[in-house]
Image: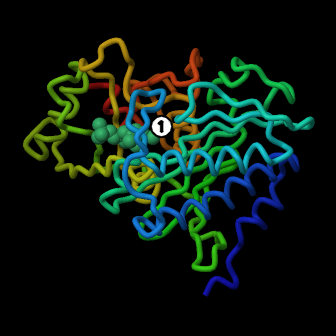
């Protein structure tokens, strides 16, 4: 069934990219395949439940957050092309010891990890940047998303898929039962129009006025100013919500809200906003903080910096900008 399909390994080998980047992508793909096994093992793999620790974001870590963070960190630091790694789960970036290290990998090892205990989708998000040297500083990680050389996520759902861009469009690969990635979704493109939105409506009373106005108009459907009915979906794992948008269009929002007025939002720029924005733009969508400002052009100031996110079908993001 998959004999005539392109393998991810062959796709990576044929990329017009330095060998070091190809090595990094191969290591990430192999590790995501291993993570998929652990996730699928669930309780049998001893993977469910809390780790008993709190991470740098003040979030309770799941056992799988810790396991997947270790798996990616160890695999990447062992790759000679890697100069350093940064993770959602660790306070500071970890600098490697590879004399020829030329890349930095920043990742959310298990996005949406509260889904794991209810057997709902989770994912891994990875951003790859060039390193200015083999011994980078913490500050070397703070590059705008526009400078990413690759971005990908793996979604662990009914199928495990890896969705990748190296700046030449977006491709989706599906993991076979024997642990091989095969190209199943070529030239992924996001439809510019949509009737589907994703936002956590339980935060409605905390939103700023433009977000209130925009969502109110969607909820009014055919009887309101938009004169069409909208549907709503919320998986509570950004990877799964973004994956749906890449597959059939839609828009996703995690806006600033008044609960923590000093924080600009919930999602993190360096390993959630930037890699997803790269994938969304490469698929023809828009990825912004407010409908206008491109996430990829936001100057980073901190590794765990938060940003508001509004991304997806281009015309609908424009409608949000005008709300
Ligand atoms: O990583 C943060 C995250 O889990 C995202 O994957 C997801 O989109 C969001 O938080 C869900 O937030 P909430 O629990 O507020 O719905
Ligand atoms: Mn996350």
Image position of 233 (left or right of 307): left
Residue at x-position 32% and y-position 22%? 256
Image position of 183 (left or right of 263): right
The image shows residue 218 at horizontal and vertical percentages of 19, 40
Which residue lies most toward the top here? 262
Q: Nearer the viewer, residue 305 or 281?
A: 305
Residue 312 in view here: no
Which residue lies most toward the left here? 223
Residue 226, above or below 183: above
Residue at x-position 61% and y-position 58%? 32
Q: Nearer the viewer, residue 106 or 99?
A: 99
Q: Quadrant of the C terminus?
A: top left
Residue 140, above or below 21: above
Q: Nearer the viewer, residue 213 or 318?
A: 213
Which residue lies most toward the front here? 52
User: SS class of the residue under badge 1?
Assistant: strand
The residue pinned by badge 1 equals 286
The image shows residue 149 at horizontal and vertical percentages of 72, 39
């Amino acid at each position: 069934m998959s004999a005539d399909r392109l393998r991810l390994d062959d796709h990576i080998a044929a990329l017009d990219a330095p060998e070091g980047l190809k090595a990094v992508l191969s290591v990430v793909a192999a590790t995501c395949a291993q993570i998929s096994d652990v996730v699928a093992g669930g309780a049998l793999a001893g993977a469910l439940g809390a780790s008993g620790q709190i991470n740098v974001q003040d979030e309770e870590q799941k056992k799988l957050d810790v396991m997947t963070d270790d798996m990616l960190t160890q695999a990447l630091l062992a790759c000679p092309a890697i100069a350093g790694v940064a993770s959602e789960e660790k306070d500071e970036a970890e600098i490697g010891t590879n004399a020829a290290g030329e890349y930095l990998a920043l990742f959310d090892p298990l996005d949406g990890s509260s889904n794991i205990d209810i057997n709902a989708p989770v994912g891994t998000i990875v951003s790859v940047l060039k390193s200015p040297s083999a011994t980078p500083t913490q500050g070397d990680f703070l590059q705008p998303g526009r400078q990413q050389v690759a971005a990908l996520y793996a979604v662990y759902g009914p199928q495990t898929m890896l969705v990748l861009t190296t700046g030449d469009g977006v491709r989706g690969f599906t993991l076979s039962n024997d642990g091989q990635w095969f190209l199943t979704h070529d030239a992924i493109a996001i439809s510019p129009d949509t009737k589907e939105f994703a936002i956590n409506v339980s935060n409605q009373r905390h939103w700023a006025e433009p977000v209130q106005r925009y969502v109110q108009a969607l909820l009014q459907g055919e009887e309101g100013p938009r004169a069409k009915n909208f549907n709503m979906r919320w998986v509570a794992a950004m990877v799964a919500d973004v994956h749906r948008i890449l597959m059939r269009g839609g828009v996703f929002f995690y806006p600033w809200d008044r609960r923590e007025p000093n924080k600009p939002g919930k999602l993190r720029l360096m390993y959630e906003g930037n890699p997803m924005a790269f994938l969304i733009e490469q698929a023809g969508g828009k990825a912004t903080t407010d409908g206008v400002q491109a996430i990829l052009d936001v100057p980073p100031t901190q590794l765990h910096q938060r940003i508001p996110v509004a991304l997806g079908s281009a015309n609908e993001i424009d409608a949000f900008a005008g709300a």
